Image (cartoon, helix red, strand yellow):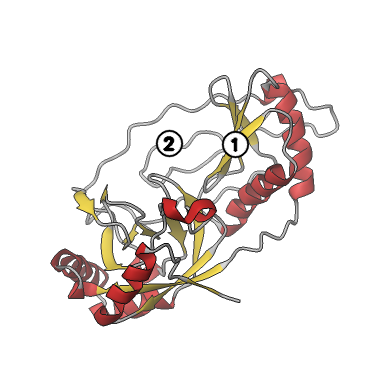
Amino acid sequence: MRVAQLPLDYAGSKASPLWTPQDTARPIDWSQRRARGAGTAMKQRLPARVRPLAPEPVVLPDAPRFLPAGDSAMVVEFGSGISPELNTRVLSLDRELQETPPSGLVETVPTYRSLMIVYDPVMTDFDTLGAAVESALLRSEGRDLNGRMWTVPVVYGGAMDEEIAADLAHVADHTGLSEREVIRMHSSAIFRVYMIGFSPGFSYLGGLPEPLHIPRRSIPKPRVEAGSVMIGGMQSAVASVPTPTGWYVLGQTPVRAFDMQRGDDTFLFRAGDMLRFEAIGESEFAPLAKRAAQGEPVARLAV
């Protein structure tokens, strides 16, 4: 049996094998589908200016891996890297399980390339759940995710904060673009919400134009405010709560990505949504922030 060979990952450490080809003519033996998690290799730490920016190559195996995560969770891993196709497979299975939940399902956690499925070990077990997930995978193929399109207002640059002004200037210097070009390029892109994580409602966004790719900070900032619109590596993000970060802040949005007073809409964005940023003036920020404080989304949904 041949193990698929993978290249080095983004940080230069050896990537682990993702899958081994299965004989599809035979019944699935779930005991053999239990893959061992790979140990975390020591990352190479290079100065920020010379850290490689090439994205991890996207690997899309024919079949996903099924990994146990403790005694009450399963991780279905679809591949490696960041790509819409890979993430669509994750979200398609997630939606299928939400609509037709197998016995014992507690919750699901979608990421860039994998779906964690938490289950009640009193009601089901790894093998039984695995068989149900395999059936759900077949039903989820070709599914239309119907992601929503949001327009998010942003005050770019130093009008709001001197540190934001310094970050924008650094990004412009690093990329060789003017600050105006950085803002134009960021606000003209269409971003995909790949996953929510790190902190409540924190949105990881793919689709950052390649000229804006930039290594993350070698020394993280101890705090940026909720609503910070940031870039780092090949991604953008919207901070949902005050947080430390190694990303560069380009601007501030009055939108509250995480707001418990919205009830069922506590998390404004969800994986699979699309975002575009709209530059607004400083005078427009305060009225929008006031409405957001009263529970309004402020970000606009495409009709």
Residue type, mark 2 in image: Lys
Residue 91, above or below 214: above
Q: Quadrant of the C terminus?
A: bottom right
Q: Identify which residue, 96 or 218, lies in the foreground.
A: 96
Residue at x 59% of width, y 36% of height: 107
**Residue 48 to residue 148: above or below:** above
- In the picture, measured across the screen, residue 101 lies left or right of residue 230, that is right
Asked whether residue 246 is in view, the answer is yes
42 up-or-down from 154: above or below:
above
- The local secondary structure at tag 1 comes to strand
Residue 112 x/y as whole percent: 52, 48
Q: Which mark is residue 14?
A: 2
Precedes in sequence: disc 2 or disc 1: 2
Residue contact at pointers 2 and 1, CB within 8 angstroms: no
Amino acid type at circle 1 is: Glu
The quarter of the image holding the N terminus is top right
The answer for how far apart the CA atoms under marks 2 and 1 are is 31 Å
Q: Which residue is mark 1?
A: 107
Q: Is residue 236 left or right of residue 95?
A: left
Image point 45% across, 66% down: which residue?
Answer: 297
Residue 242 place in picture, x, y as percent: 27, 51
Dot 2 surroundings within 10 Å: few (below 14), some, or many (20 or more)?
some
- The residue nearer to you, when weighing 155 against 285, is 285
